[in-house]
Amino acid sequence: MEKYSLSNEEFYQDVRSLGKYFTRAEDEEDSEDNYPVYQRVRSATDRYQMDQAIARGGAKIISKAYDLRTSRPIAMANLIDSDSYAKGEKFLSEAFVTASLEHPNIVPVYDAGISEQGKPFFVMKLIEGSTVEEMILRIKSEGEPGDYSLQKVLDIFLKVCDAIEYAHSKGVVHLDLKPANIQIGPYGEVLVCDWGIARLLEDVDEDTKERRSLDPIMLNDYTLDGVIKGSPGYIAPEQVDSSYGNKDEQTDIYALGALLYFLLAFRPPVKSRNSKASLIATLEGRVRNLSERKNPYFKIPEAIAAIAMKALKLDPEQRYESVSEMRSDIEKWREGYATSAEQAGFMRSLVLLFQRHQLVGSLILVFSFILAVSITQLVHSERLASHSASLAARNEARANLNEKRALDALRLYELERLEREKMASEAAPALMREGIDRMCAGSLMDAKELLEEAVDRDSGLTYAYYNLALIALAELEFYLADEYLKIYQEHSGEDVTELREISQLYSRVKKAKRTWSVEDLKSLIVEINDPEITSLIAANFYRDEPALNDVRKVFGLITRQANRSEHGWHYSLTRNSRGYSLSLNGHKKVNKLTSLRGLYFEKLDLSEMRALHGDEFRYLSAKDINIIGTLVSDLSKVLNVEGLVSVEIAIDQYEHIQDRQVGDVRIIRR
């Protein structure tokens, strides 16, 4: 064994020589190639990888993207029109404001900057799920509430209140609260989005200034450029006319009331045929009491309705003083207390007290009842015994009389019920006819309400479902249109398969594209190829006053479609603040005027054309009409055009009319 032994020094040198091999192996393992996360972050030149656009509104487009550095999906907002620094300033202000409002119910902003192309952008949390507006519309169209309930509505609303109360504590008002700006996540998240027109309050005290963490530069004057900001139906009166008050916390409280109204009634508090009418209704305070509205899944509590109506007061001073006061009323109702909005009296407060303490209250009532009965029996026992026979006889007679009265009342009730049902059934066809007439005139909102009322009164009016389907098509609600057509086809036996297939196709197209262009609209018009239907689509398109060039495209297409002619067209269509001016002078190919519905004409030149049937003028709106050299089968139909002031005819036309004035219309001969 001795010849294999090593001294201590020799052993130390051998071990030391082996150490270099372990060090070399460790160095080889500590290579960048062995750490993929480190390598991916280091090699990422472009941080964000763009995906598809998911939403578009106002001045920005929202796209789904991927953050290569943090390995997570995000939402990126890009300015659509970045041709000026002013627009970029306004756009980035929204990002800075939202980023500064750190709250669980406000959409978080992760990043903001200017791209290499000089375009501003900001990055937010990608929110799955749907908006409040989409949730309610889906429930209405599918008829399936899912987990929708009064308690869920209040949970959502209170989370929105939390976010707005926090923003107000920072001196910021949102000014554009509406169902489309409230996002509901798949796990119950509620996020307030789109702070694009938010503004910073100026009239704050010293305590508020100490709490505020926002730079006033971030909320610059670009949100106050002289244009009414907000969404009709949810906008407060002071946003329309400054004489009603300042835009402050009360403005957001009004919008919160409108949001609560929508969540419970499935419709905004102010709903009119166009934006102008909505603004006028807002200024006049024409809001139907929420307690009069019906929810198909639960009864709207009067106390909650009173809370919404108090927030929707025309005078800001009559609304809630703060969001916390409003949410406090809702929490009081949940806990069984009277709210300030309902102004409960003594009896109402007593009932609520009993409801909060049902067990104790029930025991007190039972004990009181037993005690009263015992005392009564003790005092009157002998008297009751002596008169028991006569009392029994009187009770029997009274019971017989009550039975007779009850039977008479029941028969009377049945007669009244049958009479009410008969009256409702008889009124339904008239409502349907009026709805169809309003639809043809281009008033789609009024028509929809009349037709819905008609089928509520008489579900057997299958033709009303067909016309509701046409309105849904005009409003590009393709899924709803298919549902109405399905009902119509099942009950009437009429074959509308082709129209259903078009609705189903464009429902998928619209869902896939997210945005809807005038070219998509033209494609739909060509696909349907029915002027009576496509004129409704055009009327709904005209309602929002699109670009004149887009109006010309749609108008020309439907006019050619209605008159079955593709060549030799010439017409002039212009627009100013007072309305449209159209000239079809000398046009021999036009004898159908359905494409003119939905437009108001300051001047309408139909001179030197072929003969026109009087019914073509039935649903038109115009101030001055020229029919010199054009034969109209019934001039009275022309004179009944809505808004007509004057009509020009040739000297030798309609010689039987000698007057220069017929009703409110001047007759001008040239």
Image (spheres, rainbow, N blue to C red):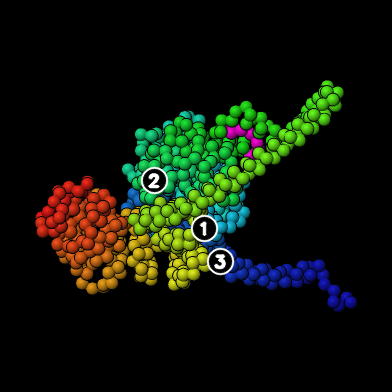
Classify the position of the N terminus by image quarter.
bottom right
Nearest to the observer: residue 70 or residue 487 = 487
> What residue is pinned by disc 1?
459
Q: Position of residue 265 (x, y in %)?
A: 52, 47
- Magenta stretch encompasses residue 609: no
Q: Position of residue 414 (x, y in %)?
A: 59, 47
Q: Position of residue 551 (x, y in %)?
A: 29, 60
| SS category of the residue bearing label 1 | loop
> What residue is pinned by disc 3?
39
Query: Going by the image, does 167 lie left or right of 391?
Result: left
The answer to whether residue 23 is above or below residue 85 is below
| SS category of the residue bearing label 2 | helix
How many numbered markers are drawn?
A: 3
Among numbered discs 1 and 2, the one appearing first in the sequence: 2
Q: Position of residue 636 (x, y in %)?
A: 23, 55
Nearest to the observer: residue 155 or residue 187 = 155
Is mark 1 in CB contact (under 8 Å) with mark 2? no
Nearest to the observer: residue 16 or residue 433 = 433
Among numbered discs 3 and 2, the one appearing first in the sequence: 3
Q: Residue drawn at (53%, 50%), measured in percent from left and top? A: 421
| Amino acid at dot 2 | Ser
**Which segment is the magenta one?**
334-340
> What residue is pinned by disc 2?
278
